[in-house]
């Protein structure tokens, strides 16, 4: 029997910011960051080029400022900076494992990391590096899910893997509805038409337009990322038939 081959050459992992806080309730739990990094390392060692968009919800969300009467744009700037902090933390964890990693930020901060450009990203992939895309899209009123769809389109990723708190897409939010049923497969259009809120509308629409499948899985399951890349694992795949 031969070992399974990766299904993809280049993928985009959306890593939930919230997942990074572990049980702490805020910030970064380094043991969790190290574990997620080990999952990414496992996939990189299969020879797959991995781009990662990190969220920032464990530190800051722009709506938190707006809901208390503050300026949403400033809040979103704070949220985007939170994703840079998470990106640097994840890069640190990956480098500890010997994985060559670069952080590219949508917001220029050259003393801290390189700025994002499509050319820089493709160059780094060709040099065998894991590339972490920080700073979201660089624009307020967007989310890191949209950044994941945007970067996936720009780098020509064959799939977006959304590593989140739940193990797939359900008929309703499984955290609120215990009777919700899980989909193994669904189309982009169905996700949008049924209003399934696991990923925002802009992100799903952009992925659909660019014919990029989205795979939703639990980031908390150790080794799940590699299993999915090798054709197994537990997840919902969003693709048009
Ligand atoms: N139909 C659905 N299927 C699965 N999860 C859903 C659904 N609707 C809402 N959710 C919720 O969406 C959450 C994931 O989205 P989000 O909070 O943006 O996570 P992340 O931090 O990974 O970006 C899940 O934790 C889940 O509770
Ligand atoms: O392109 C982007 C991406 C993110 N954000 C801000 O950054 C925060 C953190 O991102 P997100 O909520 O997507 O993180 P996650 O839910 O994945 O932890 C958001 O609330 C926004 O305030 C933004 O303004 N533009």
Image (cartoon, grey):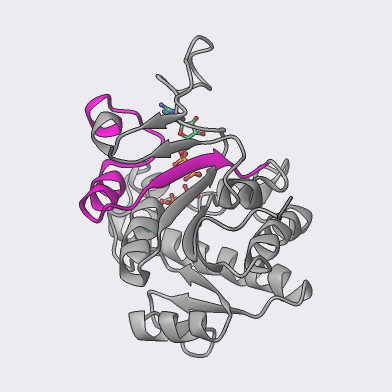
**Residue most toward the top?**
179
Q: Is residue 73 visible?
A: yes
What residue is at 37 percent from the left and 71 percent from the top?
A: 155
Q: Is residue 136 left or right of residue 18?
A: left
Q: Is residue 109 visible?
A: no
* Residue 76 place in picture, x, y as percent: 36, 58
Vertical comparison of 181 with 27: above or below: above
What residue is at 44 percent from the left and 50 percent from the top?
A: 61
Q: Is residue 220 left or right of residue 124?
A: right
Vertical comparison of 227 with 6: above or below: above
Q: Which quarter is ligand 2 in?
A: bottom left
* Residue 21 place in picture, x, y as percent: 66, 49
What residue is at 71 percent from the left and 48 percent from the top?
A: 223
Q: Nearer the viewer, residue 57 or 127?
A: 127
Vertical comparison of 32 with 182: above or below: below
Labels in figure, total: 0
Q: Nearer the viewer, residue 46 or 218?
A: 46
* Residue 68 place in picture, x, y as percent: 37, 43
**Residue most toward the bottom?**
111
What residue is at 47 percent from the left and 69 percent from the top?
A: 134
Q: Is residue 199 magenta?
A: yes
Q: Nearer the viewer, residue 28 or 238?
A: 238
Give the quarter of the figure containing the C terminus.
top left
Magenta range is 191-220
* Residue 117 place in picture, x, y as percent: 35, 82
Q: Is residue 139 left or right of residue 111?
A: left
């Amino acid at each position: 029997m031969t070992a399974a081959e990766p299904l993809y050459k280049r993928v985009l992992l959306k890593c939930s910011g919230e997942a990074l806080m572990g049980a702490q309730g805020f910030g970064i739990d380094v043991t969790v960051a190290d574990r997620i990094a080990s999952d990414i390392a496992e996939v990189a060692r299969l020879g797959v080029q991995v781009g990662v968009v990190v969220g920032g919800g464990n530190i800051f969300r722009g709506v938190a400022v707006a809901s208390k009467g503050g300026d949403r744009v400033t809040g979103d700037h704070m949220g985007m900076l939170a994703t840079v902090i998470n990106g640097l933390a994840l890069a640190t964890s990956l480098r500890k494992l010997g994985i060559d990693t670069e952080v590219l930020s949508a917001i220029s901060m050259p003393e801290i990391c390189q700025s994002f450009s499509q050319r820089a990203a493709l160059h780094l992939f060709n040099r065998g590096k894991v590339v972490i895309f920080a700073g979201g899209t660089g624009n307020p009123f967007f989310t890191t899910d949209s950044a994941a769809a945007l970067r996936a389109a720009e780098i020509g990723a064959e799939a977006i893997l959304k590593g989140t708190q739940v193990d797939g897409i359900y008929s309703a939010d499984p955290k609120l509805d215990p009777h919700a049923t899980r989909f193994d497969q669904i189309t982009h259009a169905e996700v949008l038409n049924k209003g399934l809120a696991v990923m925002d509308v802009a992100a799903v629409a952009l992925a659909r337009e660019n014919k990029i499948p989205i795979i939703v899985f639990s980031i908390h399951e150790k080794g799940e990322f590699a299993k999915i890349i090798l054709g197994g694992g537990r997840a919902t795949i969003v693709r048009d038939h």
